[in-house]
Amino acid sequence: MTKTLNVGMLGCGFMARTHSNAYAQVAHFFEVPYQPVLKVCYGREQDMDALKKFQKMWGYESVETDWKKIIERRDIDIVDVVSPNFLHKEMVVAAAEAGKKVICEKPMAMNLQEAEEMVAAVEKAGVANLVMFNYRRVPAVSLFKQIVDEGRVGRPFHYRATYNQDYTISQKVPQGGAALWRLNAKVAGSGVTGDLLAHSIDTAEWINGPIKRVVAHTEIFIKERKNIDTGQMEPITIDDACMFLALFENGSIGTFESTRYARGRKNYSSMEINGENGAIFFNLEEPEYLQFFRYADPDSGKKVEDHLTGWQKILVTNGEHPYMGKYWVPGTTIGYEHYFINTLADFLTSLDGGPKCEPTMQTAMRTQKVCDAVIRSAEEGSWIDI
Ligand SMILES: NC(=O)c1ccc[n+]([C@@H]2O[C@H](COP(=O)([O-])OP(=O)(O)OC[C@H]3O[C@@H](n4cnc5c(N)ncnc54)[C@H](O)[C@@H]3O)[C@@H](O)[C@H]2O)c1
């Protein structure tokens, strides 16, 4: 019989919605060993209206304005940290010490030191844990990795990632408050590096192996914004844009670019690898497609006939494609919310003897290490070894 898993959700914003949806949907599509039960959600006293609305829409049994009380509850099995970044460490460490399974949103922490404390806490407690790098489970991204692992790209030369948005171009966009805490360094840690490039770094290392050196440049285009919490104009200290070069241990070289000032780009996360035998390209604005350029057969090394070479645009909806067999029929697509469902399905399966679900906090600490090195490199203007 399926066991129940009682969820305590530490937040009630955007990610609290995507995670709640995943808990509600996962057992409809995957045969998971646990049936999640949405028990209690947390929000600040000042966010009570939003918290109550969130509770009603997602069907939580109760609300709580003191997250520590959720962690103290004996009936809560899993604590899901979907709060602003500065709270992640304290929440994860407390949850681990209370013996709870724990899922934490990215960026894992404000800095590497916090990430190390989190890893020590979950490992000491021996609790199952996961950092929500959901883009690994976009079926086309999983297929990207599969094709690389099958040796179809061959020796890699270049890896290229972008993560671009355009929502902070106006001087009028403030910082702080419930919604724009991302622009406040004390709450977010860093800007686009932790918020967006953390995703790109996680998938890059997952697909192409460890990064060994980086050199970065960051930019703050609008130096002051009104802080909603204080009502004053205050300096912006997060990185509005970040570009860095990376050397991978496998000998390939990479470029990474992220900004919230790329007019026209909403959530443009792209990745491309160019190797000796082939190349692959993915972009999150067309998530159901993967583009593959086949130059030579991986086994024989034989070159594809010249008149047949060219980019192949694969519609990733077949039952043979990662995760797609769990959904509808070939040719029908899935969406953003399903990447969270896929991730949760893998996590729940891992709890009952299934394959290990990555990235654990131990694995995700690598991404935090690279993010810290990128910020330090931009400050010092020099290469940093990871
Ligand atoms: N995996 C992804 O793709 C992805 C996408 C977006 C956000 N995230 C991460 O999820 C986490 C939550 O982000 P979100 O987009 O849900 O944020 P959000 O702004 O939608 O919600 C944040 C919640 O925290 C509350 N809050 C704001 N400031 C607070 C403070 N100072 N103290 C306590 N609570 C505060 C808000 O009222 C709100 O309920 C962050 O770590 C973020 O980086 C991940």
Image: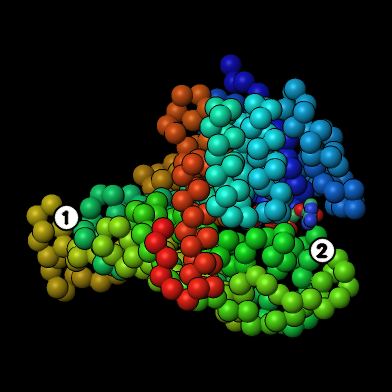
Residue that appears at 88% across and 73% down: 231
Residue positioned 50% across, 24% down in the render: 352
Ligand 1 lies under 8 Å from the Cβ of mark 2: yes
Report, in whole angstroms, how far the alpha carbon at label 1 lies from the one at label 2. Answer: 53 Å
x and y, in percent, of residue 52 in the image: 87, 45
Vertical position of residue 311 compared to residue 72: above or below: below
Camera-nearest residue between 197 and 362: 362
Amino acid type shown at disc 2? Gly
Compare residues 261 and 121 and report the one nearer the observer. 121
Place residue 213 in its image quadrant.
bottom left
- Judged from the image, the quadrant occupied by ligand 1 is bottom right
What is the x, y in percent for residue 294? 23, 64
Count neighbours of disc 1 (C-alpha within 10 A) and say few if under 14, some if 14 to 19, many if 20 or more: some
Q: Is residue 122 above or below residue 131?
A: above
Depth check: give the residue in front, 141 or 88: 88
Looking at the image, residue 271 sits to the left or right of residue 154; the answer is: right
Q: Secondary structure at mark 1?
A: loop
Q: In the image, what residue occupies the spot 55% across and 44% down?
A: 116
Residue highlighted by disc 1: 298
Which residue is denoted by mark 2 in the rendering? 177
Disc 1 versus disc 2: nearer the observer: 2
The numbered disc on residue 222 is none
SS label for mark 2: loop
